[in-house]
Amino acid sequence: MQLPDSLQPWREWLEWFAPEQLPLFADLLGRLNPMLGPLRGLQQGGVPEPDGLGDLQRRGPYERLLSSEWLLADEVPDEFLRRAVVGEHMFLAPQYRAQQASRLIVVLFDAGPLQLGSARLVHMALLILLARRAKEAGAELRWGILQHEPLLHELDSVAQLKRLLSARTFTTVNDAHWQTWRQSLQNEPMPVGECWLVGQRLPVTDRHTCTHRVQVSRSLEGQSLSVQMQAGETRRVSLPIPDERLAVQLLKGHFEGEVVQAAPSAKGLVPRVSLTLQPVISSAGTHVALKMLDEPGMVVIKLPAQNQKKSLEVRRNLWSACRTPLTVLFVGRAIGAVLSDQLQLSFWNIPGLNPVDKPSLEELKLPPGTANFLPAVGLHGHFANRLYLLDTQGHLAFWVVEKEKHTATPAPRGTQRLAAGVMAMAKVSGDAMAYVRREGDRLYAYSINSNSGDSNAAHVVGIAEGVTQVLFAASYRWRNGFGGCALLTVKNECESWRVVSVKGAPFENQRIDLARGWKGIGLLQEDDEDYSLLLISPGQQAIALHYGDDHETLFTTSAVIAKVSFCPLSGLVAVLTSARELLVYSVPKRLMRLQVFCNEQPENKDSSDA
């Protein structure tokens, strides 16, 4: 797992968590770490250990008497006795070295009713901080529960964190609990260097046995946690209440990082991919594809199922090197593309579509290079299949593949133009697409059903002036009407989005004003009425979700995000970082589906197509 530099000191323990949970710990660890202070328990102690011979001396036990003295006892016994009486015997003096006391850090937690909820997240963060503290000092860390019988545990796996969270009790901590632990610690074979007590309304302790006391309590207004540490001096810090969804997930012991860590390895090599073209996500949310850098084609990765054991399925699909891809899309589970050369447009891996003459610039303005894939949608109907493509000038074109059993009315061949002045389009249902078109000073939303192929009645979504981008929400309502969208205007370099919902007039809809640098990248409808706006952070290293008055960070990246895609149908967001790390995240499930580096040289070709 790639971690920001600020979290690298705790990498060993943070790898147990999912990437979307890291922002919560980044805040907790960053605020709590300065409170810990210097480490105690570094004094010398214990029983000295012999370390060879150091000198001769006139006193000592007779088992260390010099051998020459014993020879004198055999030859001249009277002289031996005389020397013994006057203290003239010589003894060997061993050299001793001081033994450094074993450095043991013990932390005892209050698991009672006063510490339920967000306070337990502070317990987890402190345990991780103390684990690193012990490792740096060559010490050992042990933890226990004040209300339980004296039993110390290590922190050697994520299971220990789950044990800490599951150790809930409705008994408040009292003096008897501490006295039991105090007696047990005094009988420990290894001297205790530091003893930490963490909780609320802790019992009275002495400084010799308990070196640190940490009081964790909720503020009176309920909007923050107060953490007070006593160790000679008193330090305090105020922590914001963590995001409720992430907090509940962690408190239940759902550390999705375990799933990410155990994700299947890639079968073969994942080739290097281009950082200038966005990932392509299948509508079913089962595959993601990226443009290869060293070969003309796409690498397609099948997203693993949860707890999948078999290898990750990775395939390379190649087209002719002399053709330029204008757009790439999934046709079912297969990847397809519209390719261009000087004279023709060809449809790679799209059954039923034959090459056509390249349209004139007036009909369809196609880019000479591949700065971005053009928006494209494929619809499968009962009578015909259609492929729609939006060019850089707002021209919406399509091609038709008529099914064999319905040939009474032949479909028009070649490139067909549907509309001009189109600002955006997207697939919004399994059998429908939507687009927004500028007509005069207004914007109109249309939808197309896969069976009819005709545009439904227009829906006015607002005034066109100042609108520069449109995002669509996936909804079954698009099949026969309007399903919701969001319109962007920019004011003082800050994005302002107006969400046009299914219900109500445009002027009654939600407005979302973003802080400078934040950008909207997707619109999600998680229930029948409410909409969420998917965002990318100013530094392009975090993906967040804005819903209602809340702002939730979904996950962060260690490198800058180079390209990002969002599929409103599946709710998947795919980001490609400058380090060529691909992350695929399910927004509805709040789950990281895939995390893999795409930076290896290819070894072989799975498939090719001229």
Image (cartoon, rainbow, N blue to C red):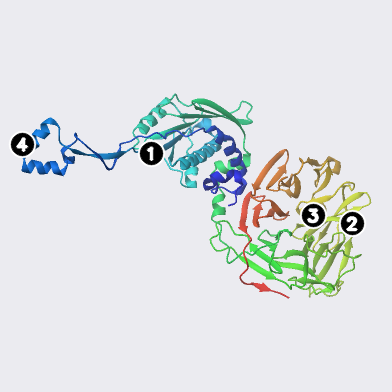
Residue 237: which quarter of the image? top right
Q: Amino acid at mark 4?
A: Asp
- Name the residue beneath numbered marker 3: 478
Q: Amino acid at mark 3?
A: Trp
Q: Is residue 418 above or below residue 540?
A: below
Residue 130: x %, y % from top left: 49, 38
Dot 1: within a 10 Å radius of its alpha carbon, few (fewer than 14), some, or many (20 or more) residues?
A: many
The alpha-carbon separation of the residues under discs 3 and 1 comes to 69 Å
Split into 4 quadrants, where in the image is the C terminus?
bottom right
Question: Which tag, 4 or 2, sits closer to the chain's start?
Answer: 4
Q: Is residue 49 above or below residue 437?
A: above
Residue drawn at the location 61% of the way across and 47% of the way down: 4
Mark-to-mark CA distance, 4 and 2:
124 Å
Q: Which residue is mark 4?
A: 78
Residue farthest to the right?
Answer: 440
Q: Earlier in the sequence, mark 2 or mark 3?
A: 2
Point out the tag, 3 or 1, that comes first from the N-terminus: 1
**Marks 4 and 1, how far apart at CA:** 50 Å
The amino acid on which the numbered mark 1 sits, given as a three-letter code, is Ser
Distance from label 1 to label 2 (Cα)? 76 Å
Q: Position of residue 330 (x, y in %)?
A: 72, 64
The residue that disc 2 covers is 421
Front label number (4 vs 2): 4
